[in-house]
Amino acid sequence: MILPGNYVRDLLQQSPGTAATARGWVKTRRDGKNVHFIQLNDGSSPTDLQVVLDEGVVPPEVVARITTGACLSVEGELVASPGKGQAVELKTRKLVVHGAAHPEEYPLQKKKHNLETLRPLGHLRARTNTFGAVFRVRNVLGRAIHKFFQDRGFLYVHTPIISSSDAEGAGSMFQVTTLELDQMARWGKPPDFGQDFFGRRSYLTVSGQLEAEILALAFANVYTFGPTFRAENSNTPRHLAEFYMIEPEMAFCDLNDDQDVAEAFLKNLVEEVFGACRPDLEFLSKWYEPELFKSLESVLGGSFERISYTEAIALLQKAGRNWEFPTNWGADLQSEHERYLTEELFKKPVIVTNYPREIKAFYMRSNNDEKTVAAMDVLVPRIGEIIGGSQREERHDVLLHKIREHAAMGMKEEAYWWYLELRRFGGVEHAGFGLGFERMMMYLTGMKNIRDVIPFPRSPGNAEF
Ligand code: 4AD
Ligand code: MG
């Protein structure tokens, strides 16, 4: 295996004269007079290691197998490189081809590929420069998220993936069952979910929030970081059926504190990724989003704009645009509205608060005006909504009333007994939010389609790999 010190990233930092072994996959091979130049990468670095192979070091039949995509080990000495772009190169003493990649059949030949044609190549696209950069950023982002919360004393908690409650009350869930549905259909029997594995209907979770609230009322500050699932049939560049969400939940916290945490969190994540992934961001900016640095710097620069939903609606009405979707008070903000506010009007992240209660989830705290709830969405340029959160309804009677109101839409009071009971035993004001991990990835990398920031995207009609 490759040990620390022997990644391509590390070898590129070493001084000439060092003995080294490199392992990885061939990006390209170029032949000079009596010499071959091989660009080798193991995924650790945006820069390849140049391997220099003199004629005669390995037999010609081995050289023939060194083609784009082949997997190699190379032993030799790092020497000063006369070429541009690297300080050292590896002069070969010994070379082994572990696995060849037939030059006529290997799909990732040198030319630049567009992202759509790479999507069906989920088993190979991680080896391209683009996905190398994207997935390295993804790794650093994951680490930065844990670091942010761990540094502030938050407890990392695991909430269930299989759940019987609809946390968002939106009804777009994947059902989980072990019943033999096709057999039942053949016998003409309706399924009895009481006989199902969990003795009731169950689903893949849409959010860990409700369970995170339980844990916040024991540990004060907690966060989840895990997969969530939505069966909404929205085939858009911003939606996945399976995505990762980070959900902090904080006791003794109101909507203002919630906004402060969200703002500090996003700023910190941008800063960390800037610090650790600059060469990758430069690559992504060059090929995919010329405004990337400008837009990320706008997060660090000043404070986020904070406006109420009511103010947002007034601004949209004043914009003098032909909106595709309505902008009357009570209508939900659509992507076109969100992007106008953050991209064009304020040109920086915007937090919109206090939405009409009708368009938000049942658990959000009712404001005194009886018309709005203590919700917040964080909008950023290029993406629109990146965070959704709220202060939670902590008053037992108000929450019960709200759940009963939703009964007509299929919400069952009995299913939320524990959520209600939490309000009867040691309740306190609390708030939290959810950051869409892949939305943040799009923001950081400049990728335009959410399917290109996760190794194996799940979307309607698409569960390959
Ligand atoms: O706004 P949402 O639905 O909020 C919640 O789920 C709350 N329970 C969060 C909380 O308060 N603890 O989702 C939160 C974020 C969105 O802002 C968006 O970034 C992302 O999750 N998101 C999606 N990302 C990719 N594909 C989808 N289908 C997404 N749906 C939401
Ligand atoms: Mg939302």
Image (cartoon, grey):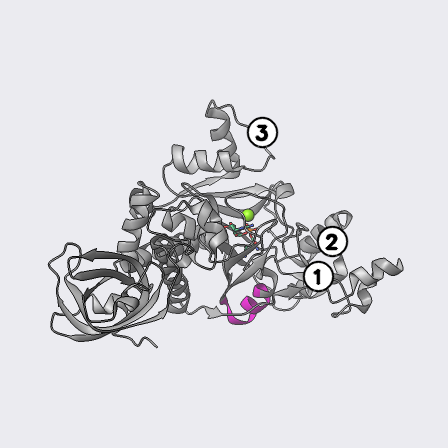
- Picture quarter with the C terminus: bottom right
Is 218 magenta? The answer is yes
Dot 2 amino acid type: Met
- Residue 302 placement: quadrant: top left
Q: Alpha-carbon neighbours of circle 2 within 10 Å: few (<14), some, or many (≥20)?
A: some
Q: Residue at x 35, y 64 (%)?
A: 70
Residue 449 circle label: none
- Is residue 201 shown left or right of residue 24? right
Residue at the spot of label 1: 416
Q: Earlier in the sequence, mark 3 or mark 2?
A: 3
Residue 326 circle label: 3
Q: Find the magenta span and give its range.
A: 212-221
Q: Position of residue 23 (x, y in %)?
A: 30, 70
126 vs 215, nearest the viewer: 126
Q: Alpha-carbon neighbours of circle 3 within 10 Å: few (<14), some, or many (≥20)?
A: some
Question: Quick one: SS at disc 3?
Answer: loop
Is 137 magenta? The answer is no
- Residue 58 placement: quadrant: bottom left
237 vs 249, nearest the viewer: 237
Question: Quick one: SS at disc 2?
Answer: loop
In space, the residues marked 3 and 2 are separated at their CA atoms by: 28 Å
Q: Earlier in the sequence, mark 3 or mark 1?
A: 3
Q: Residue at x 58, y 52 (%)?
A: 462
Question: Quick one: SS at disc 1?
Answer: helix
Q: Count numbered badges in the picture.
A: 3
Is residue 203 shown above or below 320?
below
Residue at the spot of label 2: 411
